[in-house]
Amino acid sequence: MNVLEIRDAWKSYGAVPALAGAAFELRQGELLGLLGPNGAGKTTLVRAAAGRVRLDRGSVELAGGRERLGLVPQEIAVYPLLTSRENLRAFGSLYGLPGKELDERVKWALDWTGLSERAREPVKGFSGGMKRRLNIACGVLHRPSVVLLDEPTVGVDPQSRERIYQMLDGLRSEGASLLLTTHYLEEVEARCDRVVIIDHGRSVAEGTPAELVERVLGPPRPAAGGLEVRPPGLQAVFLQLTGRDLRE
């Protein structure tokens, strides 16, 4: 069952095309990785799915309506002068959570992010990883069934990334479906159920990491003379499909 479908998505900003027919579907309960070089259209596609960008052409179909959608933006979108508890209460109020449920969800979020002991401290003093975890919690406080995460682990250390993925696993165990954009290909290869690669605003490949490797690079070849050969991975697929030129 698909919980989110984007078909033939086109979007231009003036004369600059951002999307040129991109399409993908997010299935129930999966973690889908959305990959692409800088400027490929990933963020525009996420914003279109969230209803923050109006497509010039194409369609977005979301099961359950937008009230069941959670968005975690790439930028840190919390209030630095407020505490983590105050931030969570502010976002929960925006989602319309009533008093008792809001209290319960704030307590859950503080435990889930590992920030309970820092609940009364201003966010401006938090580390990058702590801010990222709080950023995620503010986007899912209302129990969305579909969560869009734009670069949720950018700029954090490996320990923080591991904690964030434990948090995401918790969301999936509760039935949420997740769309993730990232430049960390090793994370996608290890953790995502499927991958969609876009380039120049178009979807250029889709499948599990293993399927993409075999489809793009061919089946693995046996080692000759007893040598151990390391099979190519998702990075080789990505470079093969999108090229090696810098996108800055």
Image (cartoon, rainbow, N blue to C red):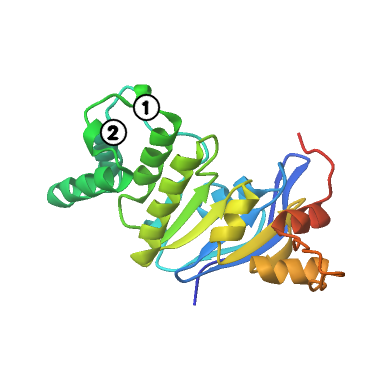
User: Tag 2: residue type?
Assistant: Ser
The residue lying furthest to the bottom in this view is 1
Q: Nearer the viewer, mark 1 or mark 2?
A: 1
Question: Is residue 79 among the parts visible in the rendering?
Answer: yes
The front one of 231 and 50 is 231
**Mark closer to the chain start, 1 or 2:** 2
Q: Secondary structure at mark 2?
A: helix
Circle 2 residues within 10 Å: few <14, some 14–19, many ≥20: many
Residue 242 versus residue 2: which sits nearer the camera?
242
Q: Nearer the viewer, residue 82 or 116?
A: 116
Packing grade of label 1 (10 A; few <14, some 14-19, many >=20) is some
* 81 to 33, vertically: above or below: above
- Measuring from the top left, give residue 150's x and y in whole percent: 54, 46
- Identify whether 5 is placed above or below 67: below
Indicate the amino acid at tag 1: Phe
Going 36% across and 65% down the picture, which residue do you hit? 173
Q: Does the residue at mark 1 contact the one at mark 2 (Cβ under 8 Å)?
A: yes
Residue with the mark numbered 1: 126
The quadrant in which residue 160 appears is: top left
Q: Is residue 108 left or right of residue 51?
A: left
On residue 75, the disc is none
User: Residue 84 appears at what percent x and percent y?
Assistant: 28, 33
Give the residue number, with chain letter if any, for mark 2: 84
> Picture coordinates of residue 55 (x, y %)?
63, 53
